[in-house]
Amino acid sequence: MLLVLILVMVVGVVAPLSAREAYEAKYRAVVTPLSLYLAHPPVLAPVTPSRSRSQATLMRGYMHALFNHQAYIHPDADNRLAALHIRTITTLTHEAEPRARDYQRLRAAGLVAVFEEAANQAKGEIQVALHPSNVRAQHIQAVEKLQEEVNRVLDVLKTEGNVDLVTNKLDIHEKARFIKAYDVLKAETKLLKKAAKLATKFPSL
């Protein structure tokens, strides 16, 4: 009985994490294993969205920053992943064709390069736009669109054996590069999912 009372007392004094604190904890847990954690972002979002329709000047400033400043996820950031999605499907679709092994290896190696390009962009978003110091300045539509497109790419590879179909054609260095890029994209989609709960919905895009 005494133990129960002690537990009740302890639980009673432990305050639940705020949405910001929960995001910070998730952010640190996701990016630290990838050596991407920064205590402070290299660039701070200069404008926080206004929730008042009367602040027209601030609203215009936010919209301009959203489309032009590196501290924000661009509303069209998802477009860059369309090519990666198609390239991934094409590589896996043609895997079973009776082509020369060298040709298949070159196709897989080409996919690695495209994955790395996407991962490099994702790293920038993780360390700047999705950093806890900037996440509330993001717009939910840009966040959700990017998350959807990243998930489309990852979903193709989630099918059992698909990752192996790619990596089996790569040498040890190419395989390491591919897995590293793949892990970065997986990390980004986890953060985007959490960021959507903190991002602004106003003004509408």
Image (cartoon, helix red, strand yellow):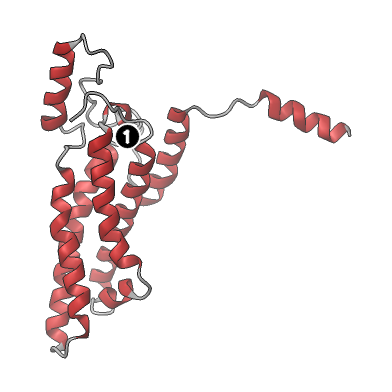
- Relative depth, front residue between 131 and 201: 201
Q: Is 160 situated left or right of 96 in this image?
A: right
Q: Quadrant of residue 133?
A: top left
The tally of labels here is 1
In the depicted view, which residue is nearer to us: 26 or 66?
Answer: 66
Residue 203, image x, y percentages: 22, 23
In the rendered structure, the answer to whether residue 117 lies left or right of residue 175 reads left
Residue 185 point in image, percent of width and height: 29, 53
Measured along the vertical axis of the image, is residue 15 above or below residue 172?
Answer: above
Residue 193 at x, y percent in the picture = 36, 43
Quadrant (top left, top right, bottom left, bottom right) of the C terminus: top left
Picture layout, residue 75 above or below residue 55: below
User: Residue 121 or 93: which is nearer the viewer?
Assistant: 93
Say which element carries label 1: loop
> Circle 1: is it few (<14), some (14-19), or many (20+) Cα within 10 Å?
many
Q: Residue 14, image x and y in percent? A: 64, 27
Up/down of 70 relative to 170, above or below: above
Q: Seen in the image, is 157 located left or right of residue 72? A: right
173 to the left or right of 37: left
User: Dividing the picture into quarters, in which one does residue 98 lie?
Assistant: bottom left
Quadrant in which the N terminus appears: top right
The residue singled out by tag 1 in the image is 131
Give, as a three-letter code, the residue at label 1.
Answer: His
In the depicted structure, whether residue 8 falls above or below residue 153: above
Residue 181 seen by the camera: no
Residue 24: quarter of image: top left
